[in-house]
Image (cartoon, rainbow, N blue to C red):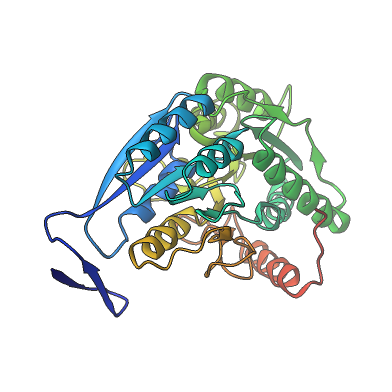
Amino acid sequence: MILVFSLVGGFVFLTNQYVPSNIAVVVIDPGFGDRSMADQAYEGLFTVEVVVDYDFRVAVDVDDLETIIESIASNGNHDVIMVIGTEVGLAAAVNTVAAAYPNQRFGFIGGFVNQPNVASATFAYKEASFLAGTLAAYLAVGNVNRTGVVGIIGSVEADSVVAEYIDGFLQGLDYANQTLGNVTLLPTQYVGSYNDSSTAENLAKNMWNPAIGNASVIFAPVRASIMGIRSAMEYANLTWFLNTLNHEPFVIAAEGNQNYMGNPNIDIRTGPSWVVTSVVPRSDLAVYRIINATLWDDFIGASDYGGEFASQFGGNLTNNGIDLEDMLEFRNEFWVTGAMINRTIDYRLAIINGTILIDE
């Protein structure tokens, strides 16, 4: 037997030092490398304190994912099967397989399955998106060169999580505009896919085009299609905004930390960013908690690991399960002012203490 000391204190007992824990991780195309939800969760996989063998699988669609996790479960070789995503029908697929294999543990990041062998992680998307909406309102009218126009581009309209992001954003935008009174909203557009950069680019170009949408800010929960938004930002800056002071093609992203997507070079990740913040559910921490609970034999099924502890509540602003990403790292103070940040902080505290109520 080998004894491994944990970084957080305590001991993990492994029966054989040459046989690490075996964990399956299943996502839907485009999978890892989406610069969004899957990549955010991926970071949590490698914060676990013991040696783990990961078995990564990428499904074509929900039906394919159900087939894959059924096959993995039938073999009985994995300590836990982690499923990551919010696609329509995904929760039902996990529920079906979990019910058929009650002795197999599952982790589900992005939805809730009420089974004793499934640990889930959900998030209060509307709370953090509300903050994004308030910031977008103030950003859109931040100086005389900005237009006061805000646009929204979502990935898949039928995705209930995308709908929550957008609804929370709209509530925040409206709340701030009750004070400002001069913010205009464009009709919401959808890419129709989680990975269609070409369509996302065209939609964003039209929104920023002064002759069409004339937007100053776009909220973009679009997953991997963020690369198209990036291309549209570059085009808009060179075509329409280059000679206009402090009128950049601003974006607020979602589903993962995409702030760097507005940097001059996304591979270097330094300098000011046109992606001023991102709405980030801490799926990385949820992954860590579920895997750690599994390996410590502290797995609690039919519970939500979106917050700091397993409970019946998901991740929210109060328990640090979701929030806006730090706005200071890539900040240009002429773009995002201290006053804007302070207002966002005030709104955040008001949501936590119940002064601001968000419609469900």
Q: Residue furthest bottom?
A: 9
| Residue 285, position as x, y percentages in the image | 45, 60
Q: Quadrant of residue 5?
A: bottom left
Instruction: Indicate the position of residue 317 as horizontal and vertical percent values.
Output: 63, 65
139 sits to left or right of 224: right
Q: Is residue 276 above or below residue 285?
A: above
Where on the picture, by quarter, is residue 38?
top left
> Dividing the image into 4 quarters, which one contains the N terminus?
bottom left
Give x and y (percent) for residue 50: 24, 63
Q: Quadrant of residue 149?
A: top right
What is the tally of numbered marks visible in this picture? 0
Q: Which residue does the image show at 67% across and 61% down from the upper left? A: 340
| Front position in the image: 203 or 22 | 22
User: In the displayed structure, does residue 276 sit left or right of residue 285?
Assistant: right
Residue appearing at x 39%, y 31% in the figure: 58
Q: Nearer the viewer, residue 30 or 258?
A: 30
User: 110 or 350, which lies in front?
Assistant: 110
Identity of the residue drawn at 50% across and 64% down: 300
Picture coordinates of residue 13, whole percent (x, y): 23, 70
Q: Nearer the viewer, residue 140 or 130?
A: 130
Q: Is residue 145 visible?
A: no
x 68%, y 45%: residue: 165
Whether residue 114 can be seen here: yes
